[in-house]
Amino acid sequence: MIFLEKRPQPSKTLSYITPVLAVLITMVAGGLLFAILGKDPVAAIRIIFWDPLFGEFAFYYRPQLLVKGGPLILIALGLSLGFKAGIWNIGAEGQYIMGAIAGAGVALALYPLEAWWIFPLMILAGALGGWAWAMIPALLKVKFGTNEILVSLMLVYVAENFLSAMAIGAMKNPEGFGFPGSRNLQQYPSAHNTEIIAGSGMHWGVAAAFIAAILAYVLLNRHLLGFQIRLTGEAPRAARFSGVKPARLVLFCMGTAGALAGLAGMFEVAGPAGQITTGFNVGYGFTAIIVAFLGRLHPIGIVLAGLLMALTYIGGEAAQSALQLPAAAIQVFQGMLLFFLLAVDVLTNFRIRITLGETA
Amino acid sequence: MDFSAINPALLIASLMVAATAVMIAAIGELITEKAGVLNLGVEGMMITGAVCGFAVAVGTGSPFLGFLAAAGGGAVLSFLFAVLTQFALANQVASGLALTLFGLGLSSLIGQNYVGIRPPPTPRLDFGPLSDLPVVGPILFNHDPMVYAGLILVALTWAFLKYTRAGLILKAVGENHDAAHALGYKVIRIRILAILFGGACAGLGGAYISLIRVPQWTEGMTGGVGWIALALVVFASWKPWRVLLGAYLFGGVTVLQLNLQAAGVAIPAEYLSMSPYLITIVVLVLMSFDRSGAPASLGRTFHASQ
């Protein structure tokens, strides 16, 4: 008879091994999926995971890794703070959109003025936009005890509708021949989120992601607030006795997550995306949830997980053109990754015991 | 602007159609939550049900088999959630999210060859001359079978929870799983059954959207209805009849805003499309004062060693 026995302490070693294990199992299961779809599984896995890094066209794909990984890392870092404390902000996609709209709004309002302070102002606006959008579920939770999961998620749909309203309404390019979508910020030097090193994919948003990772690390390991976040997640009662104010924590975690998601959106719209369009958001806010868990809610882990997830996006696109692998297959692949991660995670907290005969 | 085109009787009739999908899904989630399990994967199970039902209905030409397949598809997906949360003891919030992300991907993978196809029509129930009655006819006697099935499901769920022994055990497991375990009830087994029921209902709800309400397949077509179903359970304070009420309220808002869009109100369509989500938030806020109905063990993991 197989049963689970709770470990007195979660295993440290296994908490490092399980994400890797989950990735390996996902590769196998993903290979099976690709085989069912009639594609060569080995070739598909190689195209997704190997070629973008070391293949013939790696010089093209490697910068993309940072471009796609930047927003994922930025959003996941914010989410991880809340997840650690048991605060579930899953509306990062909406906060990402609102940050982009706020940032682009500043730029479009000032067009065609050229000044050094426009880009910093956009950064501020982007963070504020995301922060404000996250404050709605946070304040409702603090004031009325409303479920933050559902409210933050509902606001994603509201933000998506708002985005289309902006793309075909207030922010539409007056010189765009009637097509939906705003002016392209890439052609507006003061607002363009340029690459810091040309050709590296390293734009300001990527830099922000790495800075945020360092700050999150310091916060969680060297600051009282970080300790309170961890304590609330692991022992809410003990946290309350030790004087942690849950309301303050909710506002801080949700607000930070919102601001970071907003930043990610702003850097995206001012850089790689270039303009506000109806299809501007591509699901980074949701994929970042997987990134946060895969990175064990740890800043360094999140950076690695974000890069890995970016790799699946890039490799997935490559596999689409090389093998005609459907785009949705990669989405399934990413979903499976979270599944397997949660499943193997049981090994961190429990031991598997096999005994013969009856057990009490 | 022309409001005269909006006929109240037809409005109520279409409100009932708009409410059915969310109602069936919410009833399933209500049973799951009554057993103490929070499954946030409703959206994923709905969209999977929508595509399974669509594919089978198109393949066989029978909407009935389609609905059956949808229930099966939703249940299979929910079984993954059951394995994660009941055997691997994973966090229910994270597992539910995983289910939704996975379901959205899986459904677009299955559905990619079904875009632009029309499903076989589902016949309306024939009430003979009753459907020709003024006002009452279109409201009560001129619907597809699933509208009535949804209402019957609400009634059965209510009776099950209130009058049957099995319903009592289900509630006991949801209120205090340690006590239920001590009494000798199989907590894990009961929860798995509740999760499967929730999955089947979500699948049915999804198929209602793809086979009757829209009826066609597009990626991500459930558009948050699964999340609204979750909100509905909170709104209903875990009471079946209030799920019905909430679903009709939601259906009413949806239909009204669509009618307003059609009537050419000066508000842009995008802002009107926000309204169901905004109203859901308002309702959630209003209902958050009353948490008396929430099962006490909701979302907590059960492990017999503890």
Image (cartoon, helix red, strand yellow):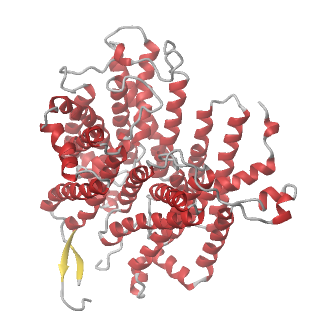
Q: Is residue A237 above or below residue A96?
A: below
Give the side of residue B213 with respect to residue A120, left or right: right
**Residue B252 horizontal/vertical position (percent):** 69, 49
| Rendered residue at 56%/64% (across/down) | B67
Give the side of residue B13 with respect to residue A53, left or right: right
Q: In which quadrant is the C terminus of chain A drawn? A: bottom left
Q: Is residue B3 above or below residue B59?
A: above
Q: Is residue A267 above or below residue B45?
A: above
Q: Residue B131 occupies which quadrant of the picture?
A: bottom right
**Residue A190 horizontal/vertical position (percent):** 33, 13
**Residue B206 horizontal/vertical position (percent):** 54, 57
| Rendered residue at 41%/17% (across/down) | A107
Nearer to the camera, A301 or B138 = B138
**Residue B191 horizontal/vertical position (percent):** 43, 74
Nearer to the camera, A43 or A167 = A43
| Rendered residue at 24%/66% (across/down) | A346
Q: In which quadrant is the N terminus of chain A drawn? A: bottom left
Give the side of residue A274 with respect to residue A50, left or right: right
Is residue B26 at least partly visible in the picture? no
User: How many numbered dots are placed on residues in this image?
Assistant: 0
Q: Is residue A290 above or below residue A215?
A: below
Q: Residue A256 occupies which quadrant of the picture?
A: top left
Is residue B155 at least partly visible in the picture? yes
